[in-house]
Image (cartoon, helix red, strand yellow):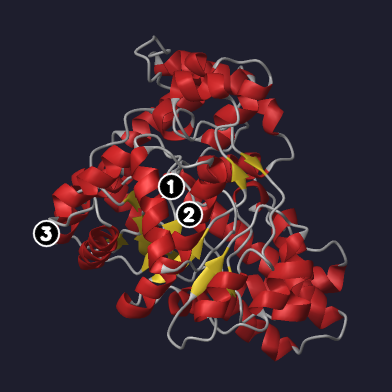
Amino acid sequence: MALLDEDRLFPVEPRTRGLARDIYRTIRDLPIVSPHGHTDPAWFALNEPFPDPAELFVVPDHYVFRMLCSQGIALTDLGVPRVDGGTSERDPRRIWQLFADNFYLFRGTPSALWLNHAFQEVFGIDEPLGPKTATRIYDHIADCLARPEFRPRALFDRFNIEVIATTEPALDPLEHHRTIRDSGWGGRVITAYRPDAVIDPEFEGFAANVARLGEITGEDTRSWHGYLAAHRARRAFFKQHGATSTDHGAPSARTEDLSPTEAAGLFDKALAGRCTAEEADRFRGHMLTEMARMSLDDGLVMQIHPGAFRNHSPAVLARHGRDKGFDVPTRTDYVRALKPLLDAVGHEPGLTIILFTLDETSYARELAPLAGAYPVLRLGPPWWFHDSAEGMRRFREMATETAGFYNTVGFNDDTRAFCSIPARHDVARRSDAAFLATLVATGRLGEGEAYEVARDLTYTLVKAAYRL
């Protein structure tokens, strides 16, 4: 008995389904290029066994525990750590049983597809997870994790990963990346520069973070010019550890292009903790433009991930910290918000800015027309709440007619869950094969063209866009 249907995500109509199968077969085994995500570089640096099934599949995965939390299950019962020193469940078997008892909640969701793919393809499990199979499946996975072939580096090779990018904050010492580089292992694990904590005046500890930025770069970050110099130094440090991109989790897509005097004044107010909400937003917006100008100098690709109301629950934030499943998409303006940045650098050769969205209504109305005109812009794939087969189909339907395929950047998995990487890339490949088959069947694309586009969407575009 298999957990997965071999024809999953393909069209129902027989001719189109057959074509989708044929297209998929040509891209199924291409190497995985994962240019943006949140896997832990310590996994690959230390190459230690994953502790247990709960730590692998439940405790770190906000896709999993947010669904369980929505049904009244406490995060502490799922082993999610508390920042206040309080107690969370430590017994991995109890966490796993609770997960298995409620696995039915994931029916029809992308998470179920990813998890079942990992169970079947990574661990060879052929029976559904549920209350009665929980112990047996736990024991099987635990036994696998004790073997050398299930350590992180071995799985990296088995997953056919060509390159994977992690994402580290600006103040990170990158010691794990240094260990990977010096180890002689052939796997390519690179970092990406995420400066939110030293760019956002509303980020907790902003002034202290900026002071620390000065300490580790030797720049006077009490001054505007020293602050910018410190960013340039850290970007160079990240490039030395493989970075080809920066990443910006801005609340909105707002950009500004302020005079040096005005920017310096806002910076002084931010350090003093005297910014209003509007001033903090203006400063963040200006720093996106500053980051774009720095990319002109150092060649780092710029990613902008706006539109999340982060940490919506103050109670969960206080108890468990950031990124614990309580981020919610918001409406996002791009046309007016990006204009200051695009006025400044929108036609600069050699600059690439990759835009993401959590607001699907903006695909056809704003993002595709912008990327279909400005040479610096590319569209990132469906992200976070929309990296599903349905989300990928909607993206292709709404973006392709204006931006085409070649103003997009392929797929990235954006995951913290290592074993979900092959599953997520497989979903993207199947979804693209289905979309291309439909274009061929309806006379909008030649069959030969479809095979070429499929390879580009899977492999070529992502390597070019992220300079890999």
**Is 188 drawn above or below residue 107 in the view shown?**
below
Q: Residue at x 12, y 55 (%)?
A: 218
Q: Position of residue 90 (x, y in %)?
A: 38, 14
Image coords of residue 369 (percent x, y)? 72, 77
Residue 135 visible somewhere in the drawing: no
3D distance between C-alphas at marks 3 and 1: 34 Å
Q: Is residue 111 left or right of residue 82?
A: right
Give the CA distance from mark 2 to mark 3: 36 Å
Q: Which circle, 2 or 3, is nearer the viewer?
A: 2
Q: Residues within 10 Å of mark 1 (few under 14, many from 20)?
A: many
Q: Can the viewer see residue 425?
A: yes
Provide residue 442's location: percent of width, then percent of height: 88, 80
Identity of the amino acid at label 1?
A: Asp
What residue type is disc 3 on? Answer: Asp
**First-in-chain label (2 vs 1):** 1
Q: Nearer the viewer, residue 290 or 402?
A: 290
Is 158 displayed left or right of 115 in the figure? Answer: left
**Label 3 sits on residue:** 182
Residue at the spot 69% in from the left edge and 63% down from the top edge = 431
In the image, residue 112 above or below residue 13: above
Q: Which mark is residue 200?
A: 1
The answer to which quarter of the image holds residue 104 is top right
Using residue 104 as the reference point, say whether residue 308 is left or right of it: left
Mark 3 element type: helix
The reply to whether callout 2 and callout 1 are in contact (CB within 8 Å) is: yes
**Tag on residue 284?**
2
Quadrant in which the N terminus is drawn: top right
Q: Secondary structure at mark 1?
A: loop
Residue at figure coordinates x 85%, y 68% from the top left: 14
Mark toward the viewer: 3 or 1:
1
